[in-house]
Image (cartoon, rainbow, N blue to C red):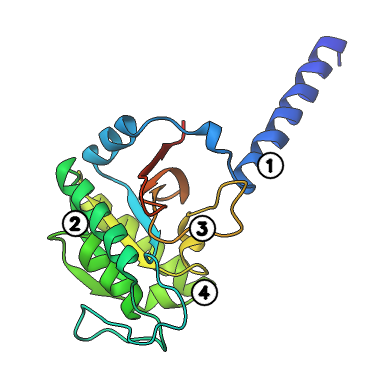
Amino acid sequence: MTRSVMLHFLCAAFFAAILSACASEGRSVDEYDPPARQYDLLRDGGYVLVMRHAHSPHGQSEPERIGADCRLGDGRGLSAFGARQARYIGETIAAENIPLLKAYTSRMCRAWDTAILAGGDAPVIPHDSQMTTAPDKVSAFKKEIEAELAANPGANIMLVSHSNIAPLYGAGPLEAEEEIPEGVVFIVIPGEWLSIGRFGREKEKAPSFSQLD
């Protein structure tokens, strides 16, 4: 093997390792682009909008719910800010003409109510997959989602769950985040199940938009 060929293989191996590490670790906010591009992608359809429920602090004295059949956790409904977070996502989806086929959700009220407010007119469907970390069930549901999107070109599907469930479907925190934030939508490519962007109102006053190359 010549020296130049050997260097070529060494460089290829190096960059492959770097790319692998970047995919598995949290991303930097510097890697994100403005929102216009992500909305263009979503208008074309074919993506999964994965999110953890909106803001829902522990210990609420009188938690409320919107979904009549949802399961209200002990002191865990949406806060007023959480409702605004979810509503903001729904308004953004409507304003940007993003097609949403349906929203699958956990049966817990904090997720179900988020789906109602964020999903707009899309049907909200409680699903056991959004409350389990069992690998076989997660894998099976991913295949269902991929089949649904393939059968409905031009549409997107939303999944609303919890901090331990959403990462199983491609949602991932930034470098400075210990876990994925509440009330933020991750744009995920089905099949690869990798996030390419995110949007949502992460703080009380300022909307946050981001998009990965």
| 2 or 1: tag closer to the N-terminus | 1
| 3 or 4: tag closer to the N-terminus | 4
Residue at screen point 26% across, 66% down: 115
How far is the residue under mark 2 from the one under mark 4?
24 Å
Label for residue 101?
2
Label for residue 133?
4
* Residue contact between numbered discs 2 and 4, judged by CB atoms under 8 Å: no
Q: Which of marks 3 and 4 is in front?
A: 3
x and y percentages locating residue 181 in the rendered image? 48, 58
x and y percentages locating residue 186 in the rendered image? 41, 50
Answer above or below: position of 69 versus 207.
below
Kindly identify the amino acid type of the residue bearing the numbered disc 1: Ala
* Residue contact between numbered discs 3 and 2, judged by CB atoms under 8 Å: no
How far is the residue under mark 3 from the one under mark 1?
19 Å
| 4 or 1: tag closer to the N-terminus | 1
Kindly identify the amino acid type of the residue bearing the numbered disc 4: Thr
Task: State the SS at label 4.
Answer: loop
How far is the residue under mark 4 from the one under mark 1?
24 Å
Name the residue carrying label 3.
180
| Crowd band around label 2 with a 10 angstrom C-alpha radius: few (<14), some (14–19), many (20+) | some
| 3 or 2: tag closer to the N-terminus | 2
Kindly identify the amino acid type of the residue bearing the numbered disc 3: Ile
Quadrant holding the N terminus: top right
**Residue 152 in view (yes/no):** no
Q: 1 or 34: nearer the eye?
A: 34
Task: State the SS at label 1.
Answer: helix
